[in-house]
Image (cartoon, grey):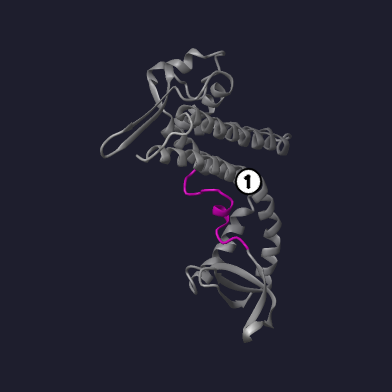
């Protein structure tokens, strides 16, 4: 097996060198780990796509040429509900997985609860959205008010929930336990709080999940990153690949030749390809 690169834009392949026995062994070791992580962490990638759809609709609203085909408030509520439902699914999925894995180790079980408590204490948008999800599912619609104002040189949109109205829908004393919501919050900017929550989901919460369930990903990411850097020095726009076997050349019509390559596409940037952003730090 050889290390090489592929520049898709230029349709150019090149082999750099033979992979060492140790490199091949590590690749074989990390392949099933990366495959399992890709499947389990797919939920974060789906959440990011849902957030992207939400942001795309907001961008449409910010375009002065926007033509309303659906009721704006209805569409905003639909997109928020879709996002919140998946966010809740992710937390339930890994909380249950955590309990199954560490059901005999209370200290490990407590780590998840402490992590969530700490994250809520340092990031109010995260705490609020966790509480808000329950309100939207059981009490009422997410959007209390939405306005779109088109001026001569700008477009302004507001998507807000009113704290006093949210508290009126309280059914139990634990409804707003994480965020400690009170009426003095007034109107809450849902665009900003959802952005803050999403960042924490893909950075802090995802980092916690990776650390607990996939500790082997760190050395795997470093291994593939080193090989990627080696190929980038040869072609900064190319993708790092592995070549298996020997290229097979065949004559084609008009005197041309075709080549058959057996390529393996290992991760180039493992965390990014898994949909995980480690540029933020989880709470300590």
* Residue 284 appears anywhere in the view: no
Whether the magenta-drawn stretch holds residue 271 is answered as yes
Q: Please state if 53 lies on the left or on the right of 153 as rendered.
A: right
**Based on the displayed image, in which of its 4 quarters is residue 44 positioned?**
top right
Q: What's the magenta bit mostly, secondary-structure-wise?
A: loop
Q: Secondary structure at mark 1?
A: helix
Residue that badge 1 annotates: 42
Q: Which residues are magenta?
A: 266-284
Above-or-below relation of 236 to 56: below
Q: Residue furthest left?
A: 152
Q: Residue 183 placed where, x, y %?
A: 41, 16
**Quadrant assignment for the N terminus:** bottom right
Q: Residue at x 70, y 67 (%)?
A: 25
Q: Residue 211 placed where, x, y %?
A: 60, 46
Q: Residue at x 46, y 39 (%)?
A: 57
Q: Please state if 82 lies on the left or on the right of 28 as rendered.
A: left
Q: Please state if 80 lies on the left or on the right of 215 as rendered.
A: left
Whether the magenta-drawn stretch holds residue 28 is answered as no
Q: Residue 15 placed where, x, y %?
A: 59, 77
Above-or-below relation of 181 to 26: above
- Comparing 181 with 215, the one in front is 181
Q: Please state if 101 lies on the left or on the right of 5 as rendered.
A: right
- Comparing 119 with 41, the one in front is 41
* Residue 199 appears anywhere in the view: yes
């Amino acid at each position: 097996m050889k290390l090489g690169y592929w520049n898709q834009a230029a349709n150019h392949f090149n082999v750099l060198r033979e992979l060492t026995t140790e490199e091949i062994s590590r690749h074989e070791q990390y392949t099933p780990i990366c495959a399992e992580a890709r499947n389990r962490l797919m939920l974060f990638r789906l959440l990011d796509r849902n957030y992207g759809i939400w942001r795309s609709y907001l961008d449409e609203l910010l375009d002065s040429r926007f033509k309303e085909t659906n009721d704006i408030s209805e569409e905003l509520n639909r997109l928020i509900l879709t996002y919140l439902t998946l966010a809740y699914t992710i937390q339930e999925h890994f909380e249950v997985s955590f309990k199954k894995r560490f059901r005999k180790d209370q200290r490990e079980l407590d780590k998840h609860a402490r992590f969530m408590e700490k994250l809520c204490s340092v990031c109010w948008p995260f705490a609020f959205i966790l509480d808000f999800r329950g309100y939207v599912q059981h009490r009422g619609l997410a959007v209390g008010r939405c306005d779109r104002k088109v001026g001569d040189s700008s477009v302004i949109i507001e998507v807000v929930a009113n704290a006093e109205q949210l508290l009126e829908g309280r059914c139990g004393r634990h409804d707003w336990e994480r965020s400690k919501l009170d009426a003095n919050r007034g109107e809450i900017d849902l665009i900003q709080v959802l952005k803050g929550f999403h960042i924490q989901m893909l950075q802090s919460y995802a980092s916690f999940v990776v650390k607990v369930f996939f500790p082997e990903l760190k050395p795997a990411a470093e291994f593939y990153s080193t090989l990627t850097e080696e190929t980038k020095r040869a072609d900064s726009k190319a993708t790092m690949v592995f070549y298996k076997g020997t290229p097979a050349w065949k004559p084609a019509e008009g005197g041309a030749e075709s080549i058959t390559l057996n390529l393996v596409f290992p991760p180039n940037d493992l965390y990014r390809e898994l949909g995980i952003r480690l540029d933020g730090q989880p709470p300590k």
